[in-house]
């Protein structure tokens, strides 16, 4: 299964090591949605047709998913910050189905990033 990453899991991001063993499929992909700065040093996105979010697509082996869920605070608890959806992601080579971690908590959506690009700090 593929994952679309748009923040700290991207190349150069502080949590990119969680993708060690995953295969980069697309480095320039776009997902439909809106990107937000959470104010906590990482972004959050919502899915929808009102914009695009830039990111990367990786093919993820089964054994990496538990670590990704943990770092993305998506463990099945009602208090999780994110939830997983599956959506179509577009890239220069075509479309891909990918898991996307989207905001589950409204308080993550502090400041909209109009261009849809998170710059790792």
Image (spheres, grey):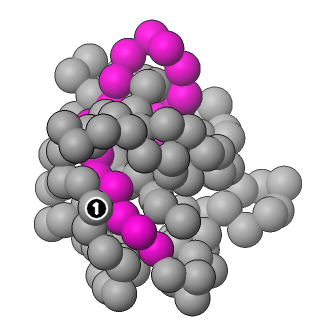
Instruction: State left or right for residue 80 relative to residue 34.
Output: right
Asked whether 67 or 78 is in front, the reply is 67
State the predominant SS element of the stretch in magenta. strand
The image quadrant that residue 23 belongs to is bottom left
Q: Is residue 80 above or below residue 108?
A: below
Instruction: State left or right for residue 78 relative to residue 5.
Output: right
Question: How far from the left and from the top, in percent, is residue 105?
Answer: 66, 39
Tell me, yes or no, if residue 92 can be seen here.
yes
Decide whether residue 58 is among the magenta residues: yes
In the rendered image, the quadrant that contains the C terminus is: bottom left
Name the secondary structure under disc 1.
strand
Q: Residue at x 19, y 53 (%)?
A: 27
The single residue placed furthest to the top in the displayed view is 50
Asked whether 10 or 31 is in front, the reply is 31
Q: Residue at x 30, y 39 (%)?
A: 94
Question: How far from the left and from the top, in percent, is residue 58?
Answer: 36, 64
Disc 1: CA contacts within 10 A as few (<14), some (14-19) or many (>=20): some
Instruction: State left or right for residue 85 relative to residue 24.
Output: right
Tell me the magenta residue range.
36-60
Tell me, yes or no, if residue 41 can be seen here.
no
Q: Residue at x 80, y 63 (%)?
A: 76
Decide whether residue 9 is among the magenta residues: no
Where does label 1 land, which residue? 25
Question: How far from the left and from the top, in percent, is residue 10?
Answer: 26, 60
Asked whether 93 or 41 is in front, the reply is 93
Task: Please give the count of numbered marks on the rendered protein.
Answer: 1
């Amino acid at each position: 299964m593929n994952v679309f990453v748009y923040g700290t899991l991207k190349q150069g991001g502080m949590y990119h090591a969680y993708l060690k063993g995953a295969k980069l499929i697309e480095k320039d992909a776009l997902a439909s949605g809106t990107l937000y700065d959470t104010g906590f040093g990482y972004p959050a996105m919502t899915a929808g047709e009102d914009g695009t979010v830039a990111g990367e697509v990786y093919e993820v082996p089964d054994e990496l998913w538990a670590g990704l869920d943990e770092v993305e605070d998506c463990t099945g608890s009602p208090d999780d910050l994110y939830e997983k959806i599956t959506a179509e992601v577009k890239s220069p080579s075509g479309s891909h189905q990918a898991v996307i971690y989207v905001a589950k908590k409204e308080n993550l959506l502090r400041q909209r990033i109009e261009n849809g690009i998170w710059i790792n700090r």
